[in-house]
């Protein structure tokens, strides 16, 4: 069994005393001190790892005032803080060993939209896409763009002065900030907006922090104008911290303190609210995807495209394109970025036009296309072709691929992974091609692989060299490359940090600014934060301080990961490969990605959080001299197991308060719905259900399982027995008192009733029930082509038998001979609960049977996506080569290639709405289009409804502990979308989805095959 893991990094006594005092105040937010909560924010999208003392999550601005006022008391002067938003930084901006102040969980409201005056007021925890969703009905959007827009907060964008695609026209975040509200470390609320020179001087006469800040800013800007002009580069991008060039207008003397806060990386104050200007949404948008024979050709051709009056020019190299082609995302763009016959596409420039005038838009596009046609004809500039996309949905899909490219680079095979540390260099666009060629020579000289993409119109390229950060020599190489890139960008009159901020690269600041100007930055830091208590070490230290800046040599994730043996890391790649890109924090309720993260707003309950906890769990086991791979093998073989008495004793000790880090990991794992969306939606393919099952299997080698686990895990064994007398069991299951007792004794709620009539009774006497192996083997080839075998699953066959019956009738009406195979347990419930030894036995038995059936060369189909896909994924991982080659398809997969053999049906006016199953949508990207083809052949229309998870996910929704979360997840998208349509026209492929709708709406949705049957 696994040992008890009692190690947890202790909280500093000063911090602990402060947190206890904070809890005794009127502070209304959350205070999290658990080791798991701290680990969840110990990393971001950088290579660094820094464990904070605690996580504090204020509910409103007054909470921050309470926090900072308390921290101003003499006994808490040593306590320090770091603000945090989405945690998507690539350079460790929000990482700290102090207290994290996370504004994303509660302070995330759009407060006011003023269309007439063209501005919006938001709390700093609002996510960028969330803001645009609120503005879209008014015809406006917040224009600074970035690849992490579905999880990056406005506060984070302000603190890094974020920008991305379209910045030549739309500028940076700071160009759109009209006013800010911030809380200083002494509890003062600072309202900043442009003020005249006279007003600034009046404010400078005030006593206290505000007066001190204005005095310093005026002094620096009035005396250092020449130095500022000389030192600050004339680039579209800005270097974070601090924007002396724009905070002061040399001609009028006007001051805008918000400009100092923009790009300050949380080192000056806690930004709580922002007033932002908003931009009208262009009525006409188009994207021209220009294809090249080399990446260098794409780079050198960029100035030509910029001159064509484009909104933006984005570039992608062949490495990124090839990674995208191997990902699920390519299915959405393959028709929009087609290969050129007999040509190799090694570079791509995406040129966007956006206008309010249709004729002007058409004129610009036509002019560029004419020039491109000429260059292709003359074989100039390496251009081999182009495609125009003027469909908004198509544009969004292409940009979705481009945004996902950031994470796709991290999915590279092998131990060396592309990492962010020199990924946002910026040089004048006219120098970009030469700069990149020299940059590539540097990386090639070090033998490094890398991918490149970015904003060539602004001179910004994202370059991520592949390094194995578990190798200490590679960590030294990172420093070497980092130093050389700083020198290279200086040579080409650019910046190393052109877009993603400084963070741990702050050590390069003094050399860039020069001592004179850097000391002025330090004086400004002193005015805001004299004791270096807000994100200390980032950007600069206070003028009077002798503390040092953070360094690129700071402790990295690799330091901890390398403590895990290579063979363990290789066995748990879906854990250690997580690079913290944070796509699992996706704000969009219609996205299936991690419903538990959406509903809890708790970073522990996300794939990134769970992967981080699992990494630490593996590390602690190794440090306790546990050979986890050997232990797992022994347990799978039935060896090294402990007695029931010992497991009960361990469980009793844990309940009485004995600390075990494994318990914190289990809490996060139990919150997972095992929907498998992360296994395909995450660009790194962080597959939580897989390592969750392995963890549970090992965890329960020490502790005793609950009755609930056994009821779920072995449901496939007792359900067929119950189905022999469904009336008897249903009489009891329909009684509230029985359900209440079940909840109290088993922890299960809303236990479903069995189907009546049963499948056997509803098809009594039907040939589909007469399975006979010998008769099937005797069929001719023609007869086999017209036969289809139906693989049963426990949920549909025994709880939703009408679906299987209607599938049989539908297949029959289509001219096929359906035959229902004998029920064989699939094992999915066992896998979900971590009964891996039993799952392997179940899978082997089922695989042997299905391989025997497969020799008949008769197609096999199943009804439930989760169970059918289990044969393809979990079976492969558990059985390897022993799985065999049997193939079980879903109905639409089987029928789509046979539609040509079906007699066309009369077109009718029926329209249906498909509510897809999470696992099906994310693991079978063609599923929806296949269903639509089938319905079209039946003369009907099928529209996809964009929804996330329904919240049931097998048995998750029946777990009493998860009931409220299950209900909340359902309300995020399913409840809202169902309210828009007649339920009789809404279809759901998943049994669990139909069960959830029945539970909360009181009526059951049809399976698509049932709708098809009604059309014949």
Image (cartoon, rainbow, N blue to C red):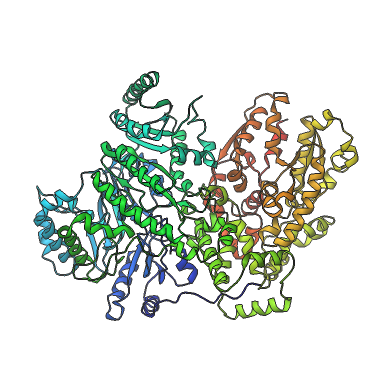
- Residue 919 pos. (x, y %): 61, 48
Q: Is 377 situated above or below 591?
A: above
Where does the N terminus fall, quadrant-wise? bottom right
- Residue 540 pos. (x, y %): 25, 62
| Camera-side residue of 269 and 972 | 269
Q: In this view, does 693 lie to the left or right of 463?
A: right
Q: Is 359 situated above or below 277?
A: above
- Residue 122 pos. (x, y %): 33, 53
Q: Is 622 situated above or below 727?
A: below
Q: Is residue 353 left or right of residue 627?
A: left
- Residue 641 pos. (x, y %): 72, 72
In the image, what residue occupies the spot 70% across and 51% down? 880
Residue 351 visible? The answer is no
| Camera-side residue of 922 and 696 | 696
In the image, what residue occupies the spot 71% across and 69% down? 707
Q: Residue furthest front?
A: 445
The image quarter in which residue 920 lies: top right
| Camera-side residue of 143 and 429 | 429
Where does the C terminus fall, quadrant-wise? top right
Q: Is residue 949 left or right of residue 989?
A: left
Number of numbered tags placed on the structure image: 0
In the image, what residue occupies the spot 71% across and 44% down? 863
In the image, what residue occupies the spot 66% across and 69% down? 700
Residue 883 visible? The answer is yes
């Amino acid at each position: 069994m696994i040992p008890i893991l009692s190690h947890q990094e202790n909280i500093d006594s000063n911090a602990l005393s402060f947190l206890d005092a904070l809890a005794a105040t009127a502070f209304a937010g959350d205070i999290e001190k658990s080791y798991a909560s701290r680990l969840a924010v110990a990393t971001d999208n950088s290579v660094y790892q820094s464990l904070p003392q605690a996580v504090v999550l204020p509910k409103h601005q007054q909470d921050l005032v309470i926090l900072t006022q308390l921290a101003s008391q003499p006994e808490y002067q040593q306590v320090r803080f770091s603000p945090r938003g989405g945690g998507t930084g690539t350079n460790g901006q929000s990482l700290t060993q102090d207290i994290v102040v996370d504004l994303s969980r509660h302070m995330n409201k759009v407060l006011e939209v003023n269309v007439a005056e063209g501005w919006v007021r938001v709390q700093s925890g609002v996510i960028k896409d969330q803001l645009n969703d609120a503005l879209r009905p008014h015809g406006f959007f917040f224009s600074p763009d970035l690849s992490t827009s579905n999880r990056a907060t406005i506060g984070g964008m302000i603190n890094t002065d974020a920008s991305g695609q379209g910045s030549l026209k739309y500028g940076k975040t700071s160009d759109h900030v009209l006013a800010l509200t911030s809380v200083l470390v002494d509890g003062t609320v600072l309202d900043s907006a442009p003020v005249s020179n006279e007003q600034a001087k009046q404010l400078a006469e005030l006593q206290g922090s505000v007066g001190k800040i204005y005095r310093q800013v005026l002094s620096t800007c009035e005396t250092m104008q020449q130095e500022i002009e000389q030192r600050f580069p004339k680039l579209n991008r800005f270097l974070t911290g601090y924007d002396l060039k724009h905070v002061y207008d040399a001609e009028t003397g006007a001051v805008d303190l918000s400009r100092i806060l923009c790009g300050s990386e949380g080192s000056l104050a806690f930004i709580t609210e922002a007033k932002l200007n908003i931009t009208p949404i262009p009525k006409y948008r188009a994207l021209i995807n220009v294809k090249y024979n080399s990446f260098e050709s794409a780079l050198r051709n960029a100035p030509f495209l910029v001159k064509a009056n484009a909104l933006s020019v984005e570039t992608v190299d062949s490495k990124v394109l090839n990674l995208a082609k191997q990902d699920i995302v390519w299915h959405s763009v393959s028709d929009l970025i087609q290969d050129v016959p007999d040509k190799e596409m090694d570079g791509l420039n995406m040129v966007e036009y956006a206008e309010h005038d249709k004729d002007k838009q058409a004129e610009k596009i036509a002019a560029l296309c004419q020039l491109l046609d000429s260059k292709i004809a003359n074989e100039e500039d390496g251009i081999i072709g182009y495609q125009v996309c003027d469909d908004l949905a198509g544009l969004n899909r292409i940009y979705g691929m481009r945004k996902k490219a950031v994470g796709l680079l991290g999915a590279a095979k092998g131990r060396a992974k592309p990492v962010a540390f020199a990924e946002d260099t910026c040089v004048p666009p006219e120098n970009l091609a030469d700069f990149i060629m020299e940059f590539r020579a540097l990386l090639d000289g070090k033998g490094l692989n890398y991918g490149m993409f970015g904003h060539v119109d602004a001179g910004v390229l994202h370059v991520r060299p592949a390094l194995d950060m578990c190798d200490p020599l590679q960590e030294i190489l990172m420093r070497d490359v980092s130093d050389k890139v700083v020198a290279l960008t200086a040579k080409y009159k650019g910046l190393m940090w052109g877009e993603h901020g400084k963070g741990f690269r702050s050590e390069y600041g003094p050399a860039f600014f020069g001592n004179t100007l850097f000391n002025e930055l330090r004086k400004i830091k002193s005015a805001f934060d004299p004791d270096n208590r807000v994100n200390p070490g980032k950007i600069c230290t206070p003028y009077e301080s002798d503390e040092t800046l953070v360094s690129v040599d700071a402790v990295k994730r690799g330091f901890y990961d390398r403590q895990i043996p290579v063979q363990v890391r290789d066995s748990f790649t879906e854990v250690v490969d997580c690079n913290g890109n944070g796509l699992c924090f996706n704000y969009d309720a219609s996205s299936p990605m991690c419903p538990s993260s959406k509903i809890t707003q708790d970073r522990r309950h996300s794939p990134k959080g769970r992967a981080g906890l699992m990494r630490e769990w593996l590390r602690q086991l190794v440090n306790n001299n546990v050979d986890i791979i050997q232990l797992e093998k022994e347990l799978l073989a039935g060896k090294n197991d402990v007695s029931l008495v010992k497991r009960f004793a361990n469980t009793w000790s844990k309940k009485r308060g004995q600390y075990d880090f494994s318990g914190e990991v289990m809490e996060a794992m139990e919150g997972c719905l095992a929907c498998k969306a992360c296994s395909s939606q995450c660009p790194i393919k962080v597959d939580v259900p897989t390592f969750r099952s392995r963890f549970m299997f090992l965890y329960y080698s020490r502790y005793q399982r609950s009755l609930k686990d056994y009821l779920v895990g072995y449901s496939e064994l007792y359900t067929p027995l119950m189905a022999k007398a469904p009336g008897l069991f249903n009489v009891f299951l329909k009684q509230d008192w029985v359900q209440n007792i079940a909840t109290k004794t088993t922890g299960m709620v809303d236990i479903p009733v069995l189907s009546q009539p049963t499948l056997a009774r509803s098809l009594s006497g039907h040939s589909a029930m007469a399975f006979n192996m010998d008769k099937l083997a005797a069929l001719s080839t023609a007869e086999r082509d017209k036969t289809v075998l139906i693989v049963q699953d426990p949920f549909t066959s025994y709880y939703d038998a009408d679906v299987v019956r209607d599938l049989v009738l539908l297949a029959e009406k289509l001219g096929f001979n359906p035959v229902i195979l004998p029920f064989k347990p699939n094992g999915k419930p066992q896998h979900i609960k971590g009964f891996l030894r039993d799952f392997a036995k179940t899978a082997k038995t089922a695989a042997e049977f299905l391989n025997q059936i497969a020799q008949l060369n008769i197609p096999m189909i199943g009804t439930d996506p989760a169970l059918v896909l289990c044969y393809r994924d979990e079976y492969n991982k558990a059985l390897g080569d022993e799985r065999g080659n049997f193939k079980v398809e879903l109905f639409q997969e089987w029928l789509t290639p046979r539609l040509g053999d079906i007699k066309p049906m009369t077109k009718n006016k029926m329209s249906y709405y498909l509510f897809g199953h999470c696992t099906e949508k994310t693991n079978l990207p063609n599923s929806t289009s296949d269903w639509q083809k089938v319905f079209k052949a039946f003369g009907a229309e099928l529209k996809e409804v964009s929804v996330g998870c329904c919240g049931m996910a097998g048995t998750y929704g029946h777990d009493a502990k998860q009931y409220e979360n299950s209900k909340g997840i359902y309300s995020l998208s399913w409840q809202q979308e169902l309210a828009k349509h007649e339920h009789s026209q809404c279809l759901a492929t998943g049994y669990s989805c139909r069960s959830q709708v029945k539970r909360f709406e009181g009526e059951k949705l049809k399976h698509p095959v049932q709708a098809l049957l009604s059309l014949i």
